[in-house]
Image: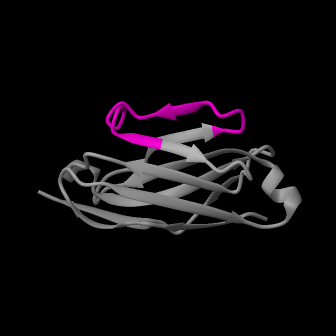
Amino acid sequence: QVHLVESGGGLVQAGGSLRLSCAASGSIVSILSINTMGWYRQAPGKQRELVADIRSDGSTNYADTVKGRFSISRATTGNTVYLQTNNLKPDDTGVYYCNSKMRSGVDVWGKGTPVTVSS
């Protein structure tokens, strides 16, 4: 079983930056069973949406709204994923959740870290 813990959220002014981290813990077998890790966000009153994800082969995928501003990366050990967020906008406000998609098809979620961007 994989356990995800996010960190790095907070309050920032528009135009600022934050670096979010997600650490995955568990047995070596479970860590090696992670296929894709990603970040989702949920704004108040809205559905959870994909922000960015990164596969085990290093390929990445971004929501159109964050392309050019956010960057996702994954530690070589495979158990930590980062989201560098730059030029933040008030619309980026929400709870950011880490997700891992296991090779078995199971989804694992962290508890989330809040990001608030003030105008």
Extent of the magenta region: 55-71
The answer to whether residue 65 shows anywhere in this view is yes
Q: What is the count of numbered marks? A: 0
Q: Is residue 81 above or below residue 7?
A: above
How are the residues colored?
one colour
Q: Residue furthest front?
A: 76
State whether residue 48 appears in this view: no
Quarter that holds the C terminus: bottom left
State whether residue 24 is above or below residue 37.
below
Residue at image point 52% right, 32% down: 61
Picture quadrant where residue 53 is located:
top right
Q: Residue at x 36, y 30 (%)?
A: 64
Quarter occupied by residue 45: bottom left
Relative to 90, residue 50 above or below: above
Residue 93 position within the rendered picture, expressed as x and y whole percent measured from the top left = 27, 57
| Magenta-drawn stretch, dominant element (helix, strand or loop) | loop
Q: Tell whether position 73 is magenta.
A: no
Relative image position of residue 18 (x, y in whole percent) = 36, 58
Residues 85 and 27: in front is 85
Residue for point 74% across, 53% down: 77
The reply, left or right, for residue 30 in relation to residue 62 is: right
The quarter in which the N terminus is drawn is bottom right
Task: Give the residue at the far right of this rendering.
Answer: 29
Residue 103 relative to residue 45: left or right: right
**Would residue 33 be found to the left or right of residue 87 on screen?**
right
Tell whether 67 sits left or right of 104.
left
Instruction: Point out residue 79 in the picture as x, y percentages from the top left corner.
Output: 70, 57
Position of residue 82 measured from the top left corner of the image (x, y, whole percent): 53, 53
Q: Is residue 52 above or below residue 82?
A: above
